[in-house]
Image (tube, helix red, strand yellow):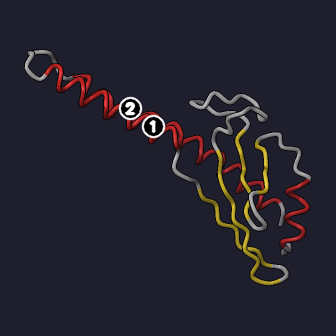
Amino acid sequence: MPVSSVEIENRLAQYPQDEFAIKKVSQNEYKFISNTSIGTMVLRSGGSVEGIKIYALFESQDHNVVNVTLKTKVRVELILTSGIILLFAVNFYMINHEQSHSNWTIIFLPVILIWLWLIYRFQEQMLALKVERYLLSLS
């Protein structure tokens, strides 16, 4: 049974926010925020850090058909971490370039960044599945 955009908006406002929180960003855009998030240290909603989040854009095609687009944005934590790792690696290399130390730490630092990215991506995928399941239950 098709659902109008007004009905979706009413149902989103009534969601109990057990698995995730829902916040309206603009007229047709909502933010779904996970209540738990490893890496951003969020254990329940209501903190100062939002943690893992997915954005949903609702575009009404006609009175009974609504297209939903789910998307994520670039994580600021990954940008900051990659910058810090890059600076540390360059400084480490410049300081130890003339010495015979092993450069395993320069190789290990990008592995940390990839690990963090994988953890965030996995959590975003899990949240997207929960949101998708919830949105499909609205129809």
Between residues 28 and 18, which one lies in front from this camera angle? Answer: 28
Seen at 32% across and 29% down, the residue is 109
Image quadrant for the N terminus?
bottom right
Numbered circle sitting on residue 104: none
Mark 2, residue position: 84
Between residues 1 and 47, which one lies in front from this camera angle? Answer: 47
Seen at 83% across and 40% down, the residue is 18
Dot 1 crowding, Cα within 10 Å, few <14, some 14–19, many 20+: few
To which quarter of the image does residue 19 belong?
top right
Disc 2 + disc 1, Cβ < 8 Å: yes
Amino acid type of the residue tagged 1 in the rendering: Leu
Q: Secondary structure at mark 1?
A: helix
Gap in angstroms between the C-alphas marked 2 and 1? 6 Å
In screen coordinates, is 48 left or right of 10? Answer: left
In screen coordinates, is 90 left or right of 80? Answer: left
Numbered circle sitting on residue 80: 1
Image x and y of residue 80, in percent: 45, 37
Amino acid type of the residue tagged 2 in the rendering: Ile
Image x and y of residue 28, in percent: 76, 67
Image x and y of residue 86, in percent: 31, 35
Dot 2 crowding, Cα within 10 Å, few <14, some 14–19, many 20+: few
Seen at 59% across and 46% down, the residue is 124
Q: Secondary structure at mark 2?
A: helix
Vertically, is 139 above or below 75? below
The number of numbered discs placed on residues in the rendered structure image is 2
To which quarter of the image does residue 41 belong?
top right
Image x and y of residue 47, in percent: 74, 32
